Image (cartoon, rainbow, N blue to C red):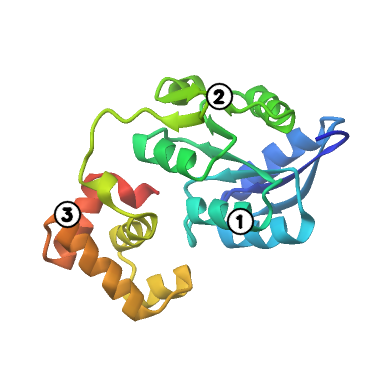
Amino acid sequence: MTGTISIVLADDHAMVRGMLGKRLEGELDMTVVAAVGNADEAITEAFRLKPDIVLMDIEMPGLNCFEAARMIRAQRPDTRIIFLSAFFHDRYIEQAMDVQAWGYITKSEPEDSVIKAIRKVSAGVAYFSPEVQARIVVDSRGARFARLGRSRVSTLTDREMEVLRYLARGMAKKQIARTMHISVNTVNRHTTSLMTKLNIHDRVELARYAIREGLAEA
């Protein structure tokens, strides 16, 4: 990538969008072509504007950010995804690696680190905050999460994980179907599979399990 770096900024907090967007616009080699409040809008703008970078918060309402990243990569493989989060849970890092994110920045870092990350990723060099770097392996195969064991959660598919998160948030199956753009019957199939894999046979207990695992934050 050469010239001005075009960026789509996605964060559900208007103040963050405003402050960070202004900071990025202050750099001579960067321009924020869109600032949006959810993952659905990030997809729309990424398809429409074809940015170099999508800088996306992980904790946003609506469509799951990792699914959004997967959709963007499928249609816009040249657009590079950088995740921004206040958290660095293993499951977030693992999913970020699974969608081949170019960066993962924790919100505890200064704005200068975001600037540095964008420039590095634009130049073809991945950037991960120190807390994230400590949990990944980078070798000839690229960056990947360093698994220390296989938990029950790790047996779930991406779609099952997504349904589990929405159940943890207390969403009804019809809401989940609308959010994920799938049928209610498909949501039911995913829910049944979740119960089988996790050995939990009650939807309320399934939601409680997801909350205990911190999945409601995703």
Do the residues bearing badges 1 and 2 touch, measured as CB atoms within 8 Å? no
The secondary structure type at the circle numbered 3 is helix
Residue 181 as seen in the image, left or right of residue 155:
right
Residue that numbered label 2 is attached to: 109
Image coordinates of residue 39 in percent, x first then y, are: 57, 57
The secondary structure type at the circle numbered 2 is loop
The number of callouts visible is 3
Residue 172 as seen in the image, left or right of residue 70:
left
Q: Residues within 10 Å of mark 1 (few under 14, many from 20)?
A: few
First-in-chain label (1 vs 2): 1
> Residue at the spot x=55%, y=44% of the render?
57
> Residue at the spot x=30%, y=64% of the render?
170
Amino acid type, callout 3:
Leu
Which mark, by number, is residue 198? 3
1 or 3: mark nearer the eye: 1
Image coordinates of residue 152 in percent, x first then y, are: 20, 46
